[in-house]
Image: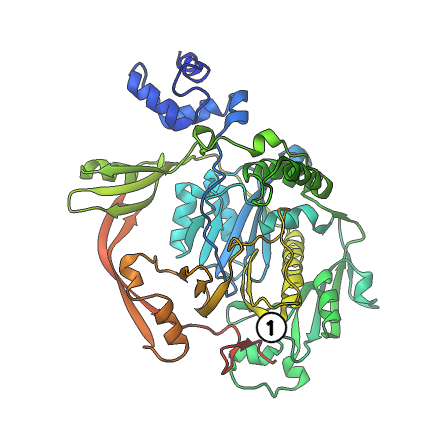
Amino acid sequence: MVEKYLSQIYYNPESPASFGGVDSIYRVVKDEGKHKISRNKIRLWLQKQDMYTLHKPVRYRFKRNRVVVGAIDEQWEADLVIMDSISKYNNGFKYILTVIDVLSKYAWAEPIKTKTGENLVKASEKILKKGRKPETFHSDKGTEFMNRKFQAFLKKHNIRFFTTQNETKASIVERCNKYGEYPIGHPEIITENFQPISDYFGLVKCSVLPPRALYHPVLPYHTQGKLMFPLCRTCADNLQQEPCHHSDAERTLHGTWVTLELEKALGKGYELMRVDEVWHFPEHTDGLFKDYIDTFLKIKQEASGFPPECDTDEKKGKYIADYAAKEGIQLDPRQIVKNPGKFAQRPNMTKVKIISDPAEYFDLLSSDQINVTDANFINDELIEVHFENVDEFVESDGKTNVVIAAFTTAHARLKLYGVLEQLNRRVLYFDTDSVIYVSKEDEWEPPTGSYIGQLTDELDGGYITTFVSGGPKNYAYETSTDKTVCKVRGITLNYRTQQHVNFDVMSGMVRGEGPEKVTVNIPYKINRNTKEKSGKTRSENKDYRIVYNKRVIVNNFDTLPYGF
């Protein structure tokens, strides 16, 4: 009865909710009052409709905030790789949780059987037990990340969380999974009679002496609970800001690295001092997850729309042809130009509700079907609540493949390093897929484009005239169009907070002309108690200061790697 009723609403062209999403159908059901049907039931019904796969709303045009990372473990990015087509060969494991540190490109991979909140928590706990933890966790808006159990896990470990507003943007994880060369099968474990590193494909446990005066080091080294890129082991261990006078033995790094990165390091002046063990994989493949990436990259790229420069039919046709030649994916021009109305909205859009009844507000906070993402007090009588629906699934266990994780790390890091070594000292700041650098006439510029893993111009043809940074995720700049941008980790910059933390304040503190710290008062901070299903509002003070110990700070506002 209910399914027939929903079919009448969805497939009737005269219905205001015809071929629409969850919200539009729910409004019609509520207005007609014939049946009591929840949004979750409507969403589950829609997922069974073949037509919904064609008309499923996708947001593709909105303002994107640039995220810049300046420290190891400051931000991790996560995604799920779908492997259900070959699950029968992998003991029923259908997914791989891929997590990558944005700055260092160190990655982890944990296979899981079903994408439940409990599974994600168990897999993530295994990753944290390896000794590292992010300050911020970034994912898409998949229910596997948005459910209450996974959100409670993040809160338990004091990890901030944010999502990609655009599900159509290709990420660094996806680029690595498509093009990266991965080992398959079992390794040959070698402990003596070693050959040159170029003869191996796999992992090498060894000791390496870094060169001097390399502005962008290649190999990571774990110390002080952080992953750094030093040129001297002892300087990094002691966070030594003074010039390095250590011996070669004191400077030598000891660790395990992927052969691809070791070869790059040797080409940049690193010296191989001793090899302890090699895991060599005779068999390997270029693109272990290529089919998965291609399947969803087509949908993502079409939903992104045409690049701004494609303003004629001829240019649009060339873009489609070039994309097919480059990526092997045939884009559908009819899907690239999407309706910005109801067909351009996600089915589980964030809802906004103005509430005056406290009971209704706490019902939202305690609901298992709702995830409250934000709340703002309008006045003493009204509160604006942002929320969305979430799903829960079934529990299962997972296993680990450190080799795949290590290779994902190496491929991503080497891709980024290719840009950094070309720009050299012109680099001011960088993260997974963006670089802030000094542009000079007749000097190399990073190529831009629309293909997976390529860089795009975030300033729409403009340029930054003044840039200042006070540490990880702590920067501000002014542009040629008189626009000022200020980003500070942990502080939401609105009218009130920008009176205390802004471009001028940050610039003065970096130059030593301002106070050592600035205290910002946040009058309405909502704290949720998930166990008691309650919420409290309190005033909170946050201190803003300049914090940086990832490299050696020199007098001209530059930084150098330890042991430079």
Amino acid type of the residue tagged 1 in the rendering: Arg
Residue found at the very far left of the displayed protein: 380
Judge left or right: residue 391 versus residue 213.
left
Using a 10 Å C-alpha cutoff, classify the residue at mark 1 as few (fewer than 14 neighbours), some (14 to 19) or many (20 or more).
Answer: some
In this picture the colour scheme is rainbow
Q: What residue appears at the point 57 percent right and 34 percent down from the top-left corner?
A: 336
Is residue 258 shown above or below 229?
above
Residue at image location 40% in from the left, 13% down from the top? 5
252 left or right, relative to 337: right
Residue at 51 percent of width and 24 percent of height: 52
Q: In the picture shown, does residue 360 fall above or below 408?
A: above
Q: Is residue 360 left or right of residue 486?
A: left
Q: Position of residue 542 (x, y in %)?
A: 30, 65
Residue 469 visible here:
yes
Residue placed most toward the observer, 406 or 245: 245
- When asked about the image quadrant of residue 511, the answer is bottom left
Q: Where residue 318 sits in the image (x, y, percent)?
A: 68, 39
Side of 127 relative to 408 (left or right): left
- Dividing the image into 4 quarters, which one contains the N terminus? top left
Residue 373 percent location from the top left of the image: 35, 44
Residue 111 at what x, y percent from top left?
A: 59, 44
Q: Is residue 486 above or below residue 207?
A: above
**Looking at the image, which residue is at 63% across and 65% down?**
420
Quadrant of the drawing holding the C terminus: bottom right
The residue carrying mark 1 is 425
The one nearer the camera, 283 or 304, is 304
